[in-house]
Image: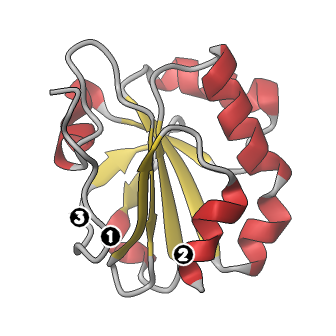
């Protein structure tokens, strides 16, 4: 399954509902007035995951100027997400994806961990950027034109 590519650009983004680290519900379809970046990452407080999410935090003003909402997503526990978010001062929510249900829909699931995958969904609900790894924020935003 490691050869499976992420959902392609131009694809309608599958809708989903997940709780965040505080138990609040995030509904993708209720974000239609904003662009949404989904960051699927393997684990809280690991070196690459921390660097990736801190880069997003450090470019928060730039993201806001482009009308972007960001959510991190992985199957970790809400308590772990809350500690991770607080420790690093992340201004975005971290969603709890029990059983990698949403990761599977977005082709970011692997047998033991989530595959690091970033999506940008535009205001009409269409995927405008999809890539494995840790793309720079500027590269993700370039998909907005």
Q: In the shown orientation, is residue 105 left or right of residue 73?
A: left
Q: In the shown orientation, is residue 64 left or right of residue 32?
A: right
Reply above or below: 118 against 45. below
Q: In x, y percent, where is residue 121?
A: 42, 71
Q: In x, y percent, where is residue 129?
A: 44, 65
Q: CA distance from mark 1 to mark 3?
A: 16 Å
Label 2 residue SS: helix
Q: Residues within 10 Å of mark 1 (few under 14, many from 20)?
A: some
Q: Give 73 or 9, whichever is nearer the viewer.
A: 9
Label 3 residue SS: loop
Q: Which residue is mark 3?
A: 15
Residue drawn at point x = 55 percent, y = 18 percent? 80
Q: Which residue is mark 1?
A: 9
Residue drawn at point x = 80 percent, y = 69 percent? 62
Counting residues from the start of the chain, the first of labels 1 and 3 encountered is 1
Residue 119: name its quadrant: bottom left
Q: Are marks 2 and 1 in contact (CB under 8 Å)?
A: yes
Of the residues tagged 3 and 2, which is closer to the observer?
A: 2
Residue drawn at point x = 50 percent, y = 67 percent? 36
Counting residues from the start of the chain, the first of labels 3 and 2 encountered is 3
Q: In x, y percent, where is residue 124?
A: 36, 87
Residue drawn at point x = 74 percent, y = 41 percent? 90
Q: Which residue is mark 2?
A: 143
Q: Which part of the image, by quadrant, shows the N terminus?
A: top left
Q: Are marks 3 and 2 in contact (CB under 8 Å)?
A: no
Q: CA distance from mark 3 to mark 2?
A: 20 Å
Q: Give 32 or 11, whichever is nearer the viewer.
A: 11
Q: Give 8 or 69, whichever is nearer the viewer.
A: 8
Of the residues tagged 1 and 3, which is closer to the observer?
A: 1
Residue 55: name its quadrant: top right
Reply above or below: 80 against 53. above
Label 1 residue SS: loop
């Amino acid at each position: 399954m490691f050869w499976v590519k992420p959902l392609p650009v131009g694809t309608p983004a599958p809708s989903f509902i997940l709780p965040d680290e505080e138990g609040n519900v995030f509904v993708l379809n209720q974000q239609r007035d904003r662009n949404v970046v989904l960051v699927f990452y393997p684990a809280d407080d690991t070196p690459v995951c921390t660097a990736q999410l801190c880069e997003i935090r450090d470019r928060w003003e730039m993201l806001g100027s482009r009308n972007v909402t960001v959510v991190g997503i992985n199957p970790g526990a809400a308590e772990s997400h809350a500690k991770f978010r607080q420790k690093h001062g992340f201004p975005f929510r971290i969603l709890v994806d029990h059983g990698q249900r949403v990761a599977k829909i977005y082709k970011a699931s692997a047998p033991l961990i989530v595959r690091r995958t970033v999506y940008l969904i535009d205001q009409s609900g269409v995927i405008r950027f999809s890539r494995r790894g840790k793309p720079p924020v500027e590269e993700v935003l370039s998909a907005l034109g």
